[in-house]
Amino acid sequence: DGKLIATEKENYTAPNWINGESAFKSTPLKYVIAEFERQYGIAITINNVHEDLIYSGSFTHKNIDLALKSITLPLHLSYDKKEDTIIISGE
């Protein structure tokens, strides 16, 4: 009868920022840190870490500790929070 029937459901996902996350794919760490600072309004100091280290992943905008772990754990980095500054260090 000439009718076209869709055989697969189209899968649309909302952008990460709508879900309260920032996502990155093969992005230099310095840009990830800049976005983190913007989202949380806090300064980050980087020690013994190359800013061009590549990061792929995401972090939440709702929980600063979870966000820090999402960035540091995959890159084998550590962090320390001091009042209004966060220090990220190479291990």
Image (cartoon, rainbow, N blue to C red):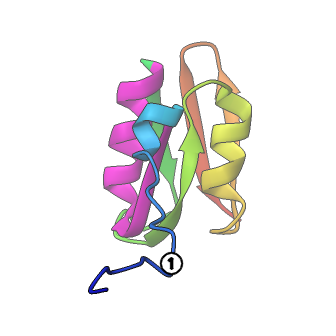
Name which residue lies at 54% across and 53% down: 58
Answer yes or no: is residue 39 visible. yes
Name which residue lies at 67% across and 67% down: 74
Answer yes or no: is residue 42 visible. no
Q: What range is drawn magenta here?
A: 21-40
Residue pushed farthest top? Answer: 83
In the picture shown, does residue 59 fall above or below 23? above
Task: Indicate the position of residue 66 as horizontal and vertical percent values.
Answer: 73, 38
Residue 68 lies left or right of residue 43; in this view the side is right
Q: Main secondary structure of the magenta part?
A: helix
Name which residue lies at 43% across and 72% down: 53
Task: Indicate the position of residue 27 as horizontal and vertical percent values.
Answer: 35, 67
Quarter containing the N terminus: bottom left
In the picture shown, does residue 85 fall above or below 28? above
Reply yes or no: does residue 50 show up in magenta: no
* SS category of the residue bearing label 1: loop
Between 91 and 55, which is closer to the camera in this rendering?
Answer: 55
Quarter containing the C terminus: bottom right
Residue pushed farthest left? Answer: 2
Task: Indicate the position of residue 78 as horizontal and vertical percent values.
Answer: 71, 53
Quarter of the figure with residue 77: bottom right
Name which residue lies at 43% across and 76% down: 6
In the picture shown, does residue 84 fall above or below 50? above
Q: Tell me the residue that label 1 is attached to.
A: 8
Neighbour class for label 1 at 10 Å: few (<14), some, many (≥20)? few
